[in-house]
Image (cartoon, helix red, strand yellow):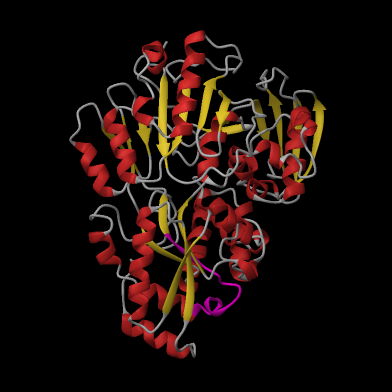
């Protein structure tokens, strides 16, 4: 897309600063002053391993691709499903099909978005079978009635499918086909853009990205930023300092001590929303010693939750009760997690485990994970369990999930619900149908499968909610997931220039935050 000379200068300066790590000189050149006023710089931690939207189940990818690609439907600020690329849609009374009409939308190369692109997208999801493919599992066929009209037929009724489509990004079939190679375009899409979303990709170096507004987008830009810059900064204190210094406008994943340091800063604010994230660990419930639920329960009972909340998390947030974060509805009244070393020892003895040695994988970029892992390691020594700590890159973890026998014995993760309906999250994460894909624990339980199957086809919200609660109760009894901490959803931002990024927006895991400016050109 053509850009003003000043904006081109901004692109080069930002790219140079990102590649060299010299953030302090990023905006030292006067020529970029006007463009800086229309740019939002976002910082977070963790590797962005790919920009292929099929991996939208990985938050660092989703945060960028949700702005580059358009889904058929999206969530509004009140969690209603509304049209996005689809201008109209109609769900069949028996919930086995949905008919769509596409709006007049364009991909970033100028090609129109057509029904054939939708067919290609879903066929590719089926072929690859990873990540967002879980949302296409029920698609039986797609009948194309016209270039802008089609019907998706499902192999079984689903009351959840429409909402799950918010996670399926429609890709430019002609463009991806030209770069398909031998891996269905995965290598090319890892660093390239085949979308129709509000922003187009200007540069990406594997961690940091620059996006520019797409002038051919079907909606007006309004007060949204002309340019977005995504920076990887793994150290929480560095992200804090960059925000205070004015080199960053909005950031995520701060440790609580750094959030506290921002509260008193003029021109900065903390946006707060109900928590949709829960930190903890998944056990390998399929193979090895953690396949025994008694071992899993013993490990859960060993952790010092109160000490962690007071020390590691500075008293902010909550100790979990159940496998889902507090921001989701339909949560049963389960007991809050607590430490009981004597009961933990008893369970290990019942399981016939002595001198047990386990391995916990964690992501070292998340500094609080390191502290939580170290505390658990110490706690487990008190019940006679040796815990080895091994760092792992998230892409490697995703690869290991393909084979339930290779899932880590314990995997520490910051888990979030990708959709506001708990039945969608539960089905993706714990159904036997998602083994080898999004089933993080390799968990299989026919009773849970039956309840989830009923929840999928139940259109009555109250009945579906009851089924969701039954599933969560069983999961808690089976100790498939060990919730350790529920953080508050706090987003520090530059309130002198930005609108509160969470007001009137769906949760950042359900749709991209608008990153609107108080004044924009």
Closest to the observer, 138 or 315 = 315
Closest to the observer, 411 or 146 = 411
Q: Could you tell me how many numbered marks the image carries?
A: 0
Closest to the observer, 80 or 260 = 260
**Which residue shows up at 45% across the image and 15% down it?**
222
Q: Quadrant of residue 98?
A: top right
Q: Quadrant of residue 344?
A: bottom left
Percent across and percent down for residue 410 are 49, 68
- Position of the N terminus, as image quadrant, is top right
Percent across and percent down for residue 124 are 75, 42
**Residue 148, magenta (yes or no):** no
Is any part of residue 161 visible from this angle? yes
**Residue 287, magenta (yes or no):** yes
- Position of the C terminus, as image quadrant, is top left
- In the image, which residues are magenta? 280-293
Percent across and percent down for residue 461 are 52, 49
Is any part of residue 453 visible from this angle? no
Percent across and percent down for residue 14 are 46, 24
Residue extending farthest to the left is: 264
**Which residue shows up at 56% across the image and 72% down it?**
285
Where is 38 relative to 155, above or below? Answer: above
**Which residue shows up at 67% across the image and 20% down it?**
106
Where is 368 relative to 11, above or below? Answer: below
């Amino acid at each position: 897309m053509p850009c003003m000379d000043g904006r081109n200068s901004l692109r080069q300066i930002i790219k140079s600063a990102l590649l060299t790590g010299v953030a302090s000189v990023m905006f030292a050149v006067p020529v970029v002053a006007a463009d800086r006023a229309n740019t939002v710089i976002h910082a977070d931690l963790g590797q962005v391993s790919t920009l292929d939207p099929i991996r939208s189940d990985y938050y660092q990818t989703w945060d960028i691709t949700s702005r580059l690609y358009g889904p058929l439907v999206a969530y509004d600020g009140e969690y209603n499903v509304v049209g996005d690329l689809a201008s109209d849609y109609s769900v069949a009374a028996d919930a086995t099909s949905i008919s769509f009409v596409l709006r007049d939308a364009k991909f970033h190369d100028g090609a129109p978005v057509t029904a054939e692109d939708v067919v290609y997208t879903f066929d590719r999801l089926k072929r690859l079978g990873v990540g967002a493919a879980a949302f296409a599992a029920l698609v039986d066929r797609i009948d194309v009635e016209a270039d802008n009209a089609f019907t998706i037929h499902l192999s079984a009724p689903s009351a959840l499918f429409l909402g799950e489509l918010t996670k399926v990004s429609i890709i430019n079939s002609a463009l991806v086909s030209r770069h398909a190679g031998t891996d269905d375009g995965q290598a090319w899409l890892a660093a390239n853009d085949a979308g129709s979303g509000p922003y187009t990709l200007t540069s990406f170096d594997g961690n940091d990205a620059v996006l520019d507004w797409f002038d051919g987008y079907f909606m007006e830009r309004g007060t949204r930023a002309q340019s977005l810059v995504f920076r990887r900064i793994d150290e929480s204190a560095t992200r804090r300092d960059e925000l205070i210094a004015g080199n960053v406008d909005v950031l995520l994943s701060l440790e609580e001590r750094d959030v506290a340091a921002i509260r008193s800063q003029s021109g900065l604010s903390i946006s707060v929303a109900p928590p949709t994230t829960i930190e903890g660990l998944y056990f390998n419930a399929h193979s090895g010693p953690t396949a025994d639920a008694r071992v899993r329960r013993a490990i859960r009972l060993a952790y010092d939750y109160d000490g962690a909340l007071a020390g590691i998390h500075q008293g902010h947030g909550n100790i979990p009760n159940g496998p889902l974060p507090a921001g989701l509805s339909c949560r049963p009244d389960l007991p809050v997690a607590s430490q009981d070393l004597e009961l933990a020892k008893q369970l290990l003895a019942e399981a016939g485990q002595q001198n047990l040695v386990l391995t916990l994988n964690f992501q070292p970029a998340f500094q609080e994970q390191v502290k939580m892992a170290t505390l658990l390691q110490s706690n487990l020594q008190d019940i006679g369990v040796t815990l080895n700590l091994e760092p792992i890159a998230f892409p490697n973890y995703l690869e290991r999930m393909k084979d339930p026998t290779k899932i880590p014995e314990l995997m520490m993760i910051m888990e979030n619900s990708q959709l506001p309906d708990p039945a969608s999250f539960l089905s993706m994460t714990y159904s036997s149908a998602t083994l080898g894909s999004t089933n993080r624990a390799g968990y299989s339980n026919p009773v849970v499968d039956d309840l989830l199957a009923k929840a999928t086809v139940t259109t009555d919200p109250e009945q579906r909610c009851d089924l969701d609660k039954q599933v969560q109760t069983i999961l808690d009894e089976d100790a498939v997931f060990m919730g350790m901490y529920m953080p508050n959803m706090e987003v520090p931002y530059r309130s002198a220039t930005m609108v509160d990024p969470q007001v009137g927006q769906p949760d950042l895991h359900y749709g991209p935050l608008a990153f609107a400016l108080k004044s924009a050109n």
